[in-house]
Image: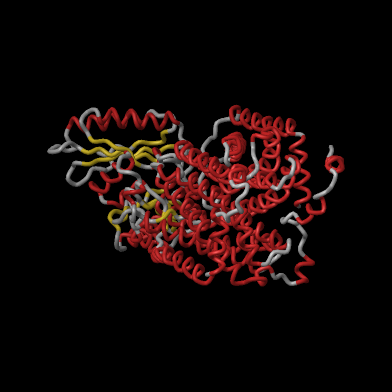
Amino acid sequence: MATFLYKLGRLAFRRRHFVALMWVALLTLAGVGAVSAPAAGSTSFSIPGTEAQKAFDLLEQRFPGASADGATGRMVFKAPEGEKMTDAAHKATVAKTVKKLGGGSEVVSVTDPFTTNAVSKDGTVAYLSVKYDAPAVGLKDATRDALETAADDARATGLTVDVGGDALQAQPDAGGVGEAIGLAIAAVVLVITLGSMIAAGLPLLTAIIGVAIGVSTIAALAKALDLGSTTSTLAGMIGLAVGIDYALFIVSRYRAELAEGRDREEAVGRATGTAGSAVVFAGLTVVIALAGLSVVNVPMLTKMGLAAAGTVVIAVLIALTMIPALLGYAGRKIRPAGEKRRKTTATAPAKPNLGTRWASFVIRRPAAVLLLGVVGLGTVALPVSRLELGLPDDGSQPTSTTQRRAYDLLSEGFGPGFNGPLMIVVDAKNSDDPKAAAATVTDGIKGLKDVVTVTPATFNKAGDTATITVVPDSKPSSARTEDLVHAIRDDVASKADADVLVTGTTALNIDFSQKLSDALIPYLALVVGLAFLLLIVVFRSILVPLKAALGFLLSVLAALGAVVAVFQWGWLGGVLGVEETGPIMSMMPIFMVGVVFGLAMDYEVFLVTRMREAYVHGESPSQAIVTGFKHSARVVVAAAVIMMAVFGGFISSGESMIKMIGFGLAIAVLFDAFVVRMAIVPAVLALLGHRAWWLPKWLDRALPKVDVEGEGLRTEKDADPDDDRELVRV
């Protein structure tokens, strides 16, 4: 591996014009594809195998043209103080709004609150519902604009008007501001770490190019592959973070090779062969973690994971080829590591850097450091025991949004359950008396607690399928609503002479959360298992990969604990702009396991491969730890700060989902890089000594030799450069 990458790096250095043109061509091709591709249509959200999805599919068959999965908009009106919505002027305003909305191109139906009894008991609040024939994420901008314009016109008459439902569902923040903040911090860190603007500019430039290619490719394929905007947001977030990190490691190693007196081409080759090997295996762990999201069997998550994994592959390829090419263009403008310091202290003995001093401290007190790190992270992880999962609804939006105000108005006028009605589908096709079966279901639901309203059954034309709307007494995200859904499925369905299915947005969220919870353990086993095998190949050890996996579990549990404390309990909510606490987004645990595991293994590979390299070259276990920190700690810290900056920039998003993801990933990197990798890892290795690098002989013979440490390059140290050129000339 190291020898191949060594030759690849030197080839890219010499053929830099060709390499640069190749990546520019790919960027242009992806950009043209994105611009010329047809606009993405309706992006479906399906959860195969769940009851809510089965009900949606059944409704599509039995109620053709009803657009069971179409978006809904809910316009809520509130009369001024001392007036009622039943006043003639206000009724006229509502009637005009209904007529205006009914003419929309994607509108299936609009309800009149005065004919559907959608007026509160005190007469001050009323609402109309708009049904569309396209899912929320597929609505045209003109349709959304028409809904907002109608609300503005009604508001101009003196009414309080707000719009809820998923028709105005807040689109995921593209992260423009967050990325800009992250890039600004990354630039400062890179300049400090690499010592010059030019050296710092290379990782930023290549990372941006990689993200541009990845996101443009996603945009070009969005229509064909049914990709949503969240897919490109995640791919851009991950691609930017790893792209900067991978390039940083190679440029940093290049400067270290220059400092040892090697010429620039040889330094590029060795940097690509050693740090590049670590980049390849670190990238593989990220790809495994992201592609492994496929096992959850939720198409949206599968597409997000595979798209982000593709962006990581691009980042790895750019780091291995474009970075060597750009280093060739930079020439002497990138100086050897520590050159200025050596000039000023030429006669003074070299002082140990901060990484060396820290490693020496840990080696002297490994047990204390290990205990402090484990207890500290364990304490932060305690809130996980109170973790509640759900999906964000309009009630979790900031109070400044119309969706949140509409949610609050509905709760005020009709009760919180009106924001998440349940739809009961009665499949009586095989029943002797469909109407009697539906009546049994209706009566059974009325007998349950936490039920406010049960509408009469509505049958299809064939008379074999009915729908019943149930309004709970509690808000959609509450545990009481979830209990009601289970009661209908378990108690009512068992007594009916028909198949009874519960669906609707609330039921779909409950099923989604349950599916993700059920998939977490298999996913964790798959991802950690594959990465464990990969790290055995890299480190030629059993205990080092085991320690890496256990350390990851500790850091991700601590990060989830912090997420629960902030977003569920409200700790530091004012500082982070969390206006509403509630259940943690159901995909958060499995998402964090996937992304954080891949990123955590990055630091493990970069830090420990340098220790392994020193150990293989004859240093004692303790000295190898110090050597690894001497050469890698500064860069690992810089990489972690950069990744935290990229993720942390998304905390400023007004969208609660993006805010939660940004905070969770940033705090996870903080815990994993600074506590697990920089403290617990050296402490464990110091306690294990030579045993850390033990591998059964039979397994050593069976495993492929990948030479991540660059041992094979030592035989080429004094090779004639011209001879080497002949070997790689194409």
Closer to us: 170 or 59: 170
Which residue: 44% across, 64% down?
Answer: 381
Where is residue 197? Give x, y as percent.
57, 35
Q: Image height check: is 407 above or below 523? A: above
- Residue at the outermost left position: 82
| Residue located 61% across and 44% down the image | 248
What is the quadrant of the C terminus in the image? top right
Residue 438 visible at all? yes
**Residue in front for this viewpoint, 609 or 316:** 609
Give the residue displayed 31% in from the left and 63% down from the top: 448
**Left or right: where 373 falls relative to 163:** right
Say which of 710 and 653 sits in front.
Answer: 710
195 above or below 277?
above
Coloring scheme used: secondary structure
Task: Specify whether 70 is left or right of 332.
Answer: left
Percent position of residue 493, x then y? 42, 63
Q: Quadrant of residue 331?
A: top right
Q: Residue at x 66, y 72 (%)?
A: 691
- Quadrant housing residue 101: top left
Which residue is at the far front? 347
How many marks on residues?
0
Rendering coords of residue 46 (x, y %): 52, 49
x and y, in percent, of residue 604 in the image: 60, 58
Residue 519 shows up from this direction: no
Asked if residue 306 lies left or right of residue 268, the reply is left
Quadrant of the image occupied by residue 729: top right
